[in-house]
Image (spheres, rainbow, N blue to C red):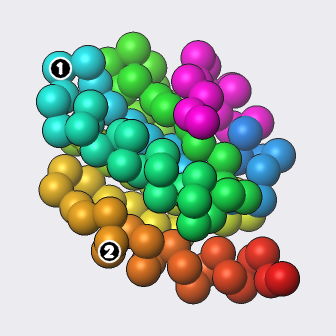
């Protein structure tokens, strides 16, 4: 389930505390974002349950978006150990996202 980020400090703390974070940047005016968000959430919950989900409204927290060089919606950033590994913006497929996450995820969360 997505945690809505309320401040830049909260976002930084989440990245420091968690081994894996998916940050979903969106705006209220973005219709694609509304369709894509539940699909991303389902993918992470079913395939990559150790990734924490963060939701950032770029229009409400422009400083968080700017600090992460996010200038379009939707944008998905995936961090492992506090470092950005994956960046997807605008039109991207869930299947492609799944394939990109699988390798670093399996390396960090070896069973």
Alpha carbons under labels 2 and 1: distance apart: 25 Å
**Observer-nearest of 35 and 20:** 35
Could you say which quadrant of the image residue 61 lies in? top left
Return the x and y of residue 30 as percentages of the image width and height. Answer: 18, 28
Task: Compare residues 87 and 105 and report the one nearer the observer.
Answer: 105
72 left or right, relative to 13: left
When asked about the image quadrant of residue 54, the answer is top right
Looking at the image, residue 96 sits to the left or right of residue 82; the answer is left
In the image, 35: left or right of 49? Answer: left
Residue tagged 1: 29
Number of dots carrying numbers: 2
Up-down relation of residue 84 to residue 28 (above or below): below
Q: Which residues are magenta?
A: 1-13
Q: 10 Å neighbourhood of mark 1: few (<14), some, or many (≥20)?
A: few
Whether 21 is among the magenta residues is no
The image position of residue 37, as x and y in percent, is 36, 40
Seen from the viewer's position, the closer of residues 54 and 46 is 46
Q: Is residue 88 above or below residue 28?
A: below
Q: In the drawing, does residue 45 fall left or right of residue 9?
A: left
């Amino acid at each position: 389930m997505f945690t809505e980020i309320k401040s830049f400090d909260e976002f930084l703390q989440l990245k420091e505390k968690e081994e894996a974070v998916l940050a979903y940047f969106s705006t209220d005016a973005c219709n694609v974002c509304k369709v894509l968000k539940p699909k991303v959430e389902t993918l992470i919950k079913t395939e990559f349950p150790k990734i924490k989900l963060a939701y950032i409204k770029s229009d409400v927290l422009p400083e968080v978006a700017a600090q992460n060089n996010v200038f379009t919606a939707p944008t998905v950033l995936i961090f492992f150990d506090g470092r950005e590994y994956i960046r997807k913006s605008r039109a991207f497929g869930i299947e492609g996202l799944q394939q990109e996450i699988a390798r670093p995820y399996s390396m960090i969360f070896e069973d």
